[in-house]
Image (spheres, rainbow, N blue to C red):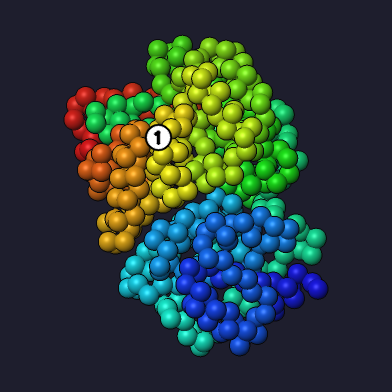
Amino acid sequence: MSARDHRIEAPRVLVVDADPFMAASAVQMLAHVGVSDVRTARDSADALALLERPLGNPDLILCALDGNGQDGLVLIRALADRAFHGQVVLTSGSDYRVMASLAAVAAESGLRIAATLSTPLEPAALGRMLADFRSAAPVAPDDAPEWLPPAIDLAGLDARVAAGAPMLAIQPLVSLSDRQVVGGEVLIRWNDAEHGVVAPAAIIAAAEATGRIDAVTNEVFRQAAEWVGYWNRMGTHVRVSVNVSIRNLDHPDLPGRLLQVCDAAGIAPEQVVIEITESGLVDASAVARGVIARLHLHGFGLSIDNFGTGYSSVEDLRDGPFSELKIDGFFLRGVHDSTDARDLIEAATARGRAVGLPLVVEGIETLEDWQLAQRLDCDLAQGYYIATPMDPALFLSWKDGWDRAIAHARVAV
């Protein structure tokens, strides 16, 4: 079967719905409109487990947002993290304005939204959506592996890593209480000559899928440490946050290697926070958990990234070696217009406060976002309202300007 036949004429569909009756109804309607390759999942955990199987990626996911609490949004976030390249249909009985807000959140996270459909589903609406999907679905080359994101020149990636070419941007991190700059998160950046700026999620997904993730992480960490060392020598002592894949943590020698990099750069481990996604911790092996504990013992900070997705219990978080919880800006999107969105971020921050760890919130884009984060007792913030990700060479001059503005009360926060 050709890629065209599979992707357009006979799409594979995954229905994610906690209500077995609604899931069965969707399967029947899909069969009625000629779609026979349909699987179902009760929740995000089941759906993600299916996606890990060989040939497990569907072309279309019907994601129910009702009845699961936060679980539909958890799945959206996880699909974005995995650079899912199919399309997503959001289904809900909510007001259309809530649906539009949630669809915008999903699209901004990098997902391709095929449609939003009201529930209970109607065969006619489902049929129209599938007709549009079949006519618009991209045709992939027959030999393109489904797990490899597009627009990734792997030879170019290898060359950049081997040459130590600049790969970083930094987004400043600011205290919500006194507005002081405490550091920033380093973000991987790659401006490809042919494809332009390549999304960080696509770079990481490709690196993980092709066994390059250790080399990429090592180089990102090295460059980040060197910048911190430079800032130390310039009299500015700040911290940086570095994202680490759960696959990196399966190497027992990781803490020793990172310590060597810190020593070479002249920085203390305490100036580095290792960010690990909350969803990744679910699948962490015994080796990975041991590595996490050793990173803590060596003085590295440990942050649970994308906190609020609901994977970890309060007890697990309280007893773990973590130093902060980071709430994804995903939860802020639409929060000022949607009661549902406000409930989500309030639940996430309440859960964080129950653990007793500092809360970092990203995605602060407006004064309203900043004020909301303060009302929710968050500790640190990052986002476009503070500063966009920048070349690390510009960080000190940006910080000087921010500090002067704060000193003269010219920043409206």
Q: Going by the image, does 195 lie left or right of 267?
A: right
Which residue occupies 42% across, 78% down?
Answer: 119
Which residue occupies 21% across, 24% down?
Answer: 407
Q: How far from the left and from the top, in percent, is residue 138?
A: 66, 68
Looking at this rendering, what residue extends furthest in the left direction? 409
Q: How far from the left and from the top, in percent, is residue 77?
A: 49, 54
Res 252 seen here: yes
- Label 1 sits on a secondary structure element that is helix
Which residue occupies 46% across, 11% down?
Answer: 233
Q: Please identify the quarter of the rendering in which residue 145 is found.
A: bottom right
Up/down of 299 relative to 280, above or below: above
Q: How far from the left and from the top, in percent, is residue 322?
A: 45, 31
- Classify 10 Å Cα crowding around label 1: few (below 14), some (14-19), many (20 and above): some
- 121 or 112: nearer the viewer: 121
- 29 or 207: nearer the viewer: 29
Residue placed under numbered mark 1 in the picture: 318
The three-letter code of the residue at mark 1 reads: Arg
Res 167 seen here: no
Q: Please identify the quarter of the rendering in which residue 354 is found.
A: top left
